[in-house]
């Protein structure tokens, strides 16, 4: 049997934040291309934005180290914040609860080592992620009009930046409201060939109008099979840099204004070019897939 969990990340409330699947049943075996195909099948069956899988770390000298992968219903992705938070939450809550371990290290395929540590005894966790590097770009009027049409944007566009590292296009709007509706046909937009391969998601953001957060955002990634992601950790590695430059702050509070909604505290570690993301998670479901994993090892 394969144990799997569903966790709501970047929230303290059930059915809020961003749900992620977490599978820990393969923690004692090394990753492989054969397992990758199996993981993709499970992620497709789970049919939520990301499902995370841990396998044996290459450096297996510590039980605080794992190899971590993330899969959407359609493909593997390089980095996922909310599923990393969810994985750490399950490890601390279900597997390492009787140990003194308070920091985990995840080895990954594309983004190096990721650290997650406990912030307190209330369940808040801190993710240590590579920072995004958004840079201003110019899009022609035809592309801008197509983006506005496919997202139903009526507001003024104040800035457009691209983060090639995370493959996210960031668009600052004069405001952000519930009238914005994404279309699957976003993937049909023909960006300039020099940037086409660097766009796998679109962040819409605006300055917050209240005092509880600095900025608000929404995130759309039909290129990865996710029309709208409820709360996106990787997007906040870009948003934190962008809004830090505008607001001259190193600690910022973001709210992702999806239907489910979620809060992300961001802190810049400029010396190490990292972004620290802090948030909570809550376990929603624990179950078993009626499949023997021995056939896939």
Image: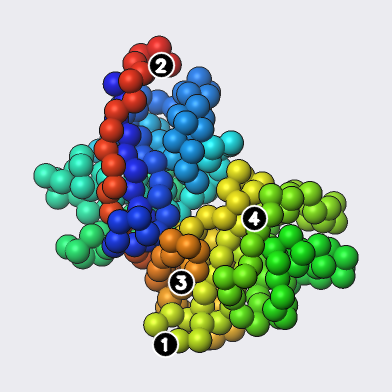
Residue at the limit of the structure toward the left, as seen here:
98
N-terminal of the two: label 3 or label 2?
A: 3
Q: Secondary structure at mark 2?
A: loop
N-terminal of the two: label 3 or label 1?
A: 1
Mark 1, other Cα within 10 Å: few <14 / some 14–19 / many ≥20? few
Q: Check contact, mark 3 vs mark 2: CB within 8 A.
A: no
Is residue 86 shown above or below 132?
A: above
Report how far apart the C-alphas of labels 3 and 2 lie in the structure: 41 Å
As drawn, is 254 to the left or to the right of 90?
right
Quadrant of the rendered structure where residue 161 is? Answer: bottom right
Q: Is residue 161 visible?
A: no
Residue drawn at x 46%, y 71% as measured from the top left: 255
N-terminal of the two: label 3 or label 4?
A: 4
- Assign the C terminus to one quadrant of the image: top left
- Assign the N terminus to one quadrant of the image: top left
Report how far apart the C-alphas of labels 4 and 2 lie in the structure: 33 Å
Mark 3, other Cα within 10 Å: few <14 / some 14–19 / many ≥20? many
As drawn, is 19 to the left or to the right of 273?
left
Q: Secondary structure at mark 3?
A: strand
Q: Check contact, mark 4 vs mark 1: CB within 8 A.
A: no
Quadrant of the rendered structure where residue 137 is? Answer: bottom right
Is residue 173 shown above or below 222?
A: below
Residue drawn at x 74%, y 60% as measured from the top left: 150
Nearer the observer: mark 3 or 2; the answer is: 3
* Residue indicated by mark 3: 255
Q: Which mark is residue 297?
A: 2
Q: Which mark is residue 211?
A: 1
Residue 73: x and y in percent read 54, 37
Q: Check contact, mark 4 vs mark 2: CB within 8 A.
A: no
Residue drawn at x 21%, y 47% as measured from the top left: 93
């Amino acid at each position: 049997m394969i144990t799997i969990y569903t966790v709501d990340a970047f929230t303290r409330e059930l059915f809020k934040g961003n749900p992620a699947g977490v599978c820990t049943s393969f923690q004692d075996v090394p990753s492989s291309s054969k397992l990758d195909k199996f993981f993709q099948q499970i992620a497709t069956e789970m049919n939520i934005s990301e499902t995370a899988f841990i396998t044996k770390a290459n450096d297996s000298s510590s039980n605080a180290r794992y190899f971590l992968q993330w899969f959407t219903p359609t493909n593997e992705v390089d980095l996922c914040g909310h599923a990393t938070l969810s994985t750490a939450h399950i490890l601390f809550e279900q597997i390492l609860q009787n140990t003194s371990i308070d920091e985990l290290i995840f080895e990954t395929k594309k983004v190096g080592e990721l650290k997650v540590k406990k912030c307190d005894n209330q369940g808040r966790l801190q993710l240590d992620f590579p920072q995004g590097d958004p840079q201003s770009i110019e899009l022609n009027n035809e592309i801008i009009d197509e983006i506005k049409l496919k997202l139903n944007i009526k507001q003024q566009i104040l800035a457009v930046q691209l983060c090639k590292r995370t493959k996210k296009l960031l668009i600052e709007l004069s405001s952000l409201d519930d009238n914005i509706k994404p279309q699957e046909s976003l993937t049909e937009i023909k960006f300039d060939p020099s940037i086409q391969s660097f766009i796998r998601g679109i962040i819409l953001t605006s300055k917050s109008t209240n005092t509880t957060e600095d900025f608000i955002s929404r995130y759309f990634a039909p290129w990865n099979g996710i029309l709208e992601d409820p709360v996106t950790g990787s997007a906040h590695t870009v948003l934190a840099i962008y809004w830090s430059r505008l607001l001259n702050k190193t600690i910022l509070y973001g709210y992702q204004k999806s239907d489910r909604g979620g809060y992300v505290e961001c802190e810049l570690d400029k010396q190490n070019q990292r972004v620290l993301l802090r948030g909570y998670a809550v376990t929603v479901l624990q179950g078993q897939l009626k499949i023997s994993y021995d056939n896939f090892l």
